[in-house]
Image (cartoon, grey):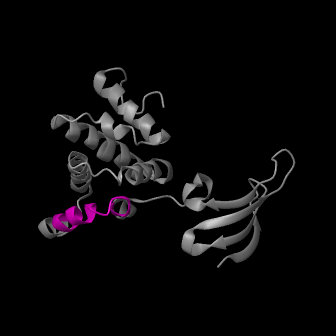
Amino acid sequence: MWDKLGNRSWKTGVQITSYMASHRAVQLRGEGAGRGAYNGDIDLRRMSAARLVMTQDQIIPLLMESCPSFRAVVDEHQQENGEEILSVLLSGFARHLLQLHQQHQTEAFPAVAEAIERMHVEGDPFVRESATIGLLEGIQNVWSNEGVDPELFARYLLPESARWWRSLQDFWSGRSKFVGDGL
C-alpha cells in the first residue's frame, strides 16, 4: 500500500507523491523549469542521493542476502570464533565464490556484484574500503592463487566496482602509486 506524502525535494524539485516502506520505493512526479518532468516509480535502493549510508554491520547481511549459500560459511565462522571477524569473513566470501565458480553455480554472481556495487556507492568510508580491499582484492588473490582467472568474476561487476577492480590491478602491476590513484 502506498502512503501519500506530497513532500518536495528542495534540491531536485521532484515531488514525492507516495512511498512504500516495505519495498523502499517511491513514486515521483518531476516539476521545474529546465529539468523536464518525470513520472514513475524509483527504487530507493538504486538512488544514491536518497540513501542512508551503509555501515559495517550491514556488510555480512548484505552478502548473505546476495548469496544465500554464504550463510553456512558465516554460521561455521561464528561457531569457531564466537563472533564475526569481518576480514576473515570477507576472505571466506572470496573462497566461497571461487567454490561456487568451480561447481558451475554462478547464479548468485549478478546479485553479489550488485551487493559489492552498493557497498561502493552507498557505503561509509570503511564499507567502501572493505568492498575494495576486503572483497575485490580478496577475489583477485584467492582466485589467482588457485590458478583461476579472477576476470571470470570481474565480468559481473558494475561500473563503480569495475573501476576499483582496475585500480587494484594498476596498483599491483606498478602502474599506480596507490589503490584509487586517478579515480
Say if 50 sits above or below 79 in the image. above
Q: Residue at x 46, y 59 (%)?
A: 54
For the stretch drawn in magenta, the main secondary structure is helix
**Is residue 56 shown in magenta?**
no
Q: Residue at x 31, y 37 (%)?
A: 152
Of 97 and 86, nearer the camera is 97
Of 42 and 128, nearer the camera is 42
Q: Residue furthest left?
A: 80
Determine whether, in the image, residue 26 is placed left or right of residue 172.
right
Say if 168 sits above or below 59 in the image. above
Q: Residue at x 17, y 63 (%)?
A: 77
Residue 10: name its quadrant: bottom right
Q: In x, y percent, where is residue 5? A: 74, 74
Determine whether, in the image, residue 170 is placed left or right of residue 160.
left
Q: Residue at x 29, y 23 (%)?
A: 173
Point out the stretch of residues depicted in magenta: 64-77
Q: In x, y percent, where is residue 177? A: 36, 24
Determine whether, in the image, residue 145 is placed left or right of residue 25.
left
**Is residue 76 shown in magenta?**
yes
Residue 58: name its quadrant: bottom left
Q: If the image is split into quadrants, where does the N terminus sit?
A: bottom right
Q: Residue furthest front?
A: 104
